[in-house]
Image (tube, grey):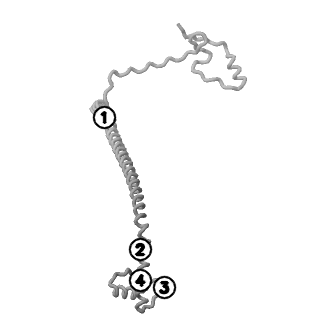
Amino acid sequence: MNTTTMTPTSGADRAALLRAAKGQPAPTSQVPMGIRATVGPGVPATPTPAPAPPVAEARRSMDELLRVAADSEAARTRQFAAKITALMAELTERVEAEETTRREREAAEKRRQELAEAEAALASKLAEVRQELRSTGRRDSAASPSRNRRAGADDRAKIRAWALANGYQVKDRGRLSREIREAYAAATASEVDQ
């Protein structure tokens, strides 16, 4: 069994004298000077911790505690209970508002993600349709312009020949006048492109 012993030192401590000679301050100590407390040989004593307060057998719920405090005889206790009740109501409102905002934000983010996916699907479908339209349009338009030009050139050659044969003055190239086209259409009972 270890026992605490107090041993007085004789006069000035040798370490204290050396510290004083070097101009160093003495260390602060909780034990009075000249007395050294030890537990066992050469081990300094450590203070024993204060005993923990007894744990309540059963804790009261907050609602029960506030109800008891509201019925208290002490005015300060009733005021304190009223203040805590008001703070709890405000805290509840704030927490509910934050939860509502968080749920709305999550719903909006989910909707944005759904719309982005739908947009990507539509963009992909649109690209396919455009590609199909381009490939279909090339086959149809590839033959038509040359046919149209050739047919137009043939029509103009016929009109020039008819105009020269009927006394009209026509240039070998260029656009035919409206008067010549209308005269040709009336004479041949055909439609001429403008």
Q: Residues within 10 Å of mark 3 (few under 14, many from 20)?
A: few
Q: Which mark is residue 120?
A: none
Label 4 amino acid?
A: Lys
* Viewer-side label of 2, 1: 2
Which is nearer the N-term, disc 2 or disc 4? 2
In the image: residue 17, left or right of residue 40: right
State whether residue 142 is above or below residue 165: above
Which is nearer the N-term, disc 2 or disc 1? 1
State whether residue 55 is above or below residue 162: above
Label 3 amino acid?
A: Asp
Which corner quadrant of the image does residue 168 belong to? bottom left
In the image: residue 7, left or right of residue 148: right
**Do the residues bearing badges 1 and 3 touch, measured as CB atoms within 8 Å?**
no
Position of residue 23 measured from the top left corner of the image (x, y, whole percent):
70, 26
Q: Where does label 3 land, which residue?
A: 172
Q: Where does label 4 land, which residue?
A: 158
Q: Residue at x 42, y 60 (%)?
A: 135
Q: Where does label 1 land, which residue?
A: 78
Q: Which mark is residue 148?
A: 2
Position of residue 119 measured from the top left corner of the image (x, y, whole percent):
38, 53
Q: How far separated are the C-alphas under marks 1 and 3?
A: 115 Å
* Viewer-side label of 2, 4: 4
